[in-house]
Image: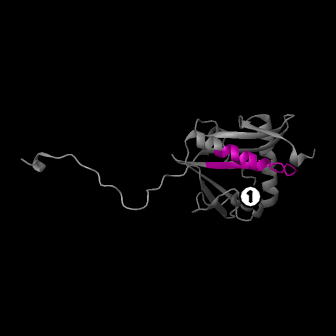
Amino acid sequence: MNQSSMAIVVRREDPDSDDARLLLDELGALLALRHGDSGQAGFDPEDFRSTRGGFIIARTLHGEPVGCGGFRRFSYETVEIRRLYRRPEMSGVGSAVLESIEDAARETGYRRIVLRVWASDIRAIDFILRHGYSSIEKFGGKTANGEGALCFGKRLVETPEAPEGPQPKRKGRRGATDRKD
């Protein structure tokens, strides 16, 4: 069995664990190589330990960490994804981590999910678009090295729409002035 078809287990874990640090350091090194900034300065593990946040690690069935991602409160109804990563040889892990984050965010009560990616990271942008995200208004400014970031979002919970067509009129209570004698 090759690594890209290997079964994985995805679950919430501590963002300060040895395996989380290992994956986050790999991601930081990759981002520093590609963009000149690791992005680690903006990562605070406490953001992902709250009841409205979380950190996910994907592992092989043998326990090897192969991907990760975190989510934290952005606003009351919106969660932000941070530090989404999978080892390059592990195809499918990014999707599993993203789906796990979306499920956990939905279970936590969030209705919307947002994230930022480097404007030059075409692979990340393609990945996000393939998973149903669309471009949204920018938030968070530029990345640390001044490169622009693109922002994406997705609804986690569909809001019920008002039915089309005329609505039935509500019957109100009759007041003293409405009485017919």
Q: Mark 1, residues whose alpha carbon is within 10 Å: few (<14), some, or many (≥20)?
A: few
Q: Is residue 157 visible?
A: yes
Is residue 73 magenta-colored? no
Q: Which residues are magenta?
A: 80-102
Q: Residue at x 67, y 44 (%)?
A: 101
Colouring scheme, one of rainbow, by chain, secondary structure, one colour: one colour
Could you say where residue 53 lies in the image, as x and y percent from the top left?
61, 40
The single residue placed furthest to the right in the displayed view is 1
Relative to 77, 58 lies left or right: right
Q: Residue at x 66, y 42 (%)?
A: 44
Q: Nearer the viewer, residue 174 or 146?
A: 174
Q: How many discs appear?
A: 1
Q: Nearer the viewer, residue 71 or 162?
A: 162
Relative to 127, 153 lies left or right: left
State the SS at label 1. helix
Q: Quadrant of residue 31?
A: bottom right
Q: Residue at x 79, y 35 (%)?
A: 18
Q: Is residue 40 visible?
A: no
Question: Which residue, given by chain and number where applicable, does mark 1 sit on?
Answer: 127
166, above or below 40, in the image: below
Could you say where residue 67 lies in the image, as x and y percent from the top left?
79, 44
Image quadrant where one finds the N terminus: top right
Could you say where residue 90 lies in the image, as x and y percent from the top left?
85, 48
The single residue placed furthest to the front in the displayed view is 181
Is residue 92 magenta-colored? yes
Q: Nearer the viewer, residue 107 or 153?
A: 107
Relative to 141, 121 lies left or right: right
Q: Nearer the viewer, residue 139 or 100?
A: 100
The kind of residue on which mark 1 rests is Phe
Could you say where residue 164 lies in the image, as x and y percent from the top left?
43, 61
Q: Quadrant of residue 148?
A: bottom right
